[in-house]
Structures are given as structure tokens and as C-alpha cells.
Image (cartoon, rainbow, N blue to C red):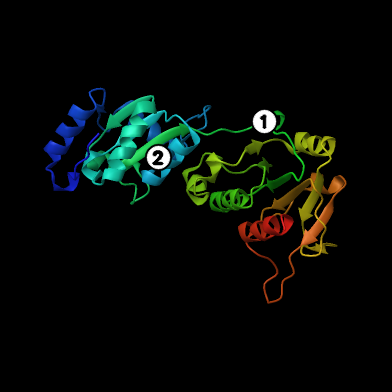
Amino acid sequence: MSFVDLSKMEQEDAYALFEKRYPHLQFIGKSHGAIQTIRHLYKNTKANPDKLCPIEGIWGGEQLLRVGITPRILLVCPEYIHTAQAQQLIDELQKKAESFYAVSKKVFDTVREDASAGGILCVFPMKIHTLDEITPKKNFRMIVLDGIEIQGNAGTILRSADATAFDAVAFTHRKIRLNHPKLVRASMGSVLHVPIVDAPVEELIPWLEKHGIRIVLADTDHAVDYAEYDYPEKTCLVVGSEKYGIYKPWYEVSHDTIAIPMKGTVDSLNVAIAATVLMYQSII
């Protein structure tokens, strides 16, 4: 399919081109159910049993295509679609999307959060794995986010887990929404690549013990220097919130503790930075 520079077109001409190119495309307004769904997802104002999540821009659409995820909703704004890259992406996404809509710039600006979204917004179901779906292999690596309270930190840890080829990221005592747009953005798409588990600690600990996975807590008390610790072939790192630390049940089972020495005046690192340091050290 040939693509043209839409930036030189009048609004009406751009709309007409999209109508001709995609006969099944629906042009909708602010009161349409799809727009209301997206707003509710951003504001977390309705139940979301399918773990639907918005992802914006060319980058977001390319991530979905790369991992083969079918968008539930593909929303585009012809007034923002200028480049051949964006048009080619839309052409690929619309073949897979369950619903395909176009809106005006005014409506699109009311739902998108990223100023660089470029006229493309997808809604997709986020995959949350069960423990039964995780098969520990040799040199298995998992990190547990226990009571983490900030979406940006969780997303950054997921990004680092992807960079270090960790096998899974688990959430216990969860206090954040796993499909929160801030978490997705901070992860730079890693939520689509790294298996995410949401499990009670009462289920996760027996599962770790059953599979011979050593529990290693990031804690400064009675801890071994993280650089001197001999990480087992199967290791589960556990990090806690900066305010409350790791919850008590983790200390009631067999475990090791490691710490990152503080050489200056601060007594700790941001949890996402600390987790990244520990993950990289564990794979050396």
C-alpha cells in the first residue's frame, strides 16, 4: 500500500483518505463507548476483569505487533498521522484489532496522556501468569516485588528484569494496579515480554521451596555484601517498599539476606535502582 504525507492535507481530505482506505473504520465522538472505556482505564473508575490497558504511540503499537498481541481497540486520529511509518503501522494493526475507530484531534487529546502519542492509541489485555504457568529451568531467576507502592518503580524493575533476562517478576502484597499506564510506560514495553505473576505470599513461598529456588532478601540487617554473595543456580530476589521494607512472612522461612553497601551519607537506594544492581550482579 502506498502512503502519503498527511501533514500537507486539509483535515477533511485526511479523513476522506482514511475512509476510502479502510471501509470498516468507524468515526466516533466523545460519547462513544470506546472513548468511555479508555477514560475509565486511565482513571481506574470501573471494574476491569480482562486487565485491559492502554498503550500509546508508534512505539506502543509496534510492541504489540512484535509479541503478537491483538488490540481490543485501535484508536487513531488522522490529524496526527503524518509519517509513512505511522500509516504503515496502522495498516498492520487494523488487520488484527477487534475494533477500529477514528476521532478528531479534539477528542483524541481528551483521552491520550502522552503528548508524543502521534495519533495512535491501542487497548490490549495484559497477560498475568499463574505460578502453574512458570516452569523453573536451570539458572532460574525471579524477582519479587513485595508491597511496592509506586507504579514507576515497578515498571523500571520490569524493564531491568527484561534487560537481565530474568525469567519472571512476581508481585506479593500488591498495592498497585498492574495494568496502570504509568507502569507500562516505565517498563518501556517489558510488561509484554517478561512473565508477570500476581500471587499471595502464602502460595509463592511453598512454590519456591518445592522447586528448590533459594529465597534471597534485599535487607541491610545481618546481610552479606551483594557482590560477595554466591548466587545459587535458582534464585529468587525479594525487594520491598522503601517505606515498609519486606513483609514478615519472608523472614519466617529459610532465606539469605544481601545488601548494597552505602558509602556516602544516604542509607539506601531507590528500590528500582537497588533491584537493578542486584539483578545484574546475580547473572554475572
**In the image, what residue occupies the spot 84% across and 38% down?**
209
Sort mark 1 into few (<14), some (14-19) or many (20+) by Cα contacts within 10 Å.
Answer: few
Task: Compare residues 48 and 255 and report the one nearer the observer.
Answer: 255
Q: Position of residue 165 (x, y in %)?
A: 64, 48
Question: Residue 224 appears in which quarter of the rendering?
Answer: bottom right
- Please identify the quarter of the rendering in which residue 257 is found: bottom right
269 with respect to 34 (left or right) = right
Provide residue 144's location: percent of width, then percent of height: 70, 46
Q: Name the residue that disc number 1 marks.
A: 130
Q: Residue at x 70, y 34 (%)?
A: 134
Element assignment for label 2: helix
Residue 32 rendering spot, x and y as whole percentages: 30, 27
Answer above or below: position of 18 versus 227. Answer: above
Point out the image quarter for the C terminus: bottom right
Q: CB of mark 2 within 8 Å of CB of mark 1? A: no
Badge 1 element: loop
Q: Amino acid at mark 1?
A: Thr
Query: Is 132 situated above or below 191?
Result: above
Q: Please, which residue is most extreme toward the right here?
A: 254
Sequence-first tag of 2 and 1: 2
Label 2 vs label 1: CA separation? 26 Å
Q: Quadrant of the N terminus?
A: top left
In the rendered image, the residue lying farthest to the bottom is 264
Name of the residue lying farthest toward the top: 24
**Residue 97 visible somewhere in the drawing:** no
Please indicate, yes or no, whether residue 10 appears anywhere in the rendered image. yes
Identify whether 36 is placed above or below 110: above
Left or right for 195, reference 281:
left
Please tell me which residue lies in front, 228 or 45: 228
Q: Which residue is mark 2?
A: 61
What residue is drawn where x is 72% and y is 33%?
Answer: 135
Sort mark 2 into few (<14), some (14-19) or many (20+) by Cα contacts within 10 Å. Answer: many
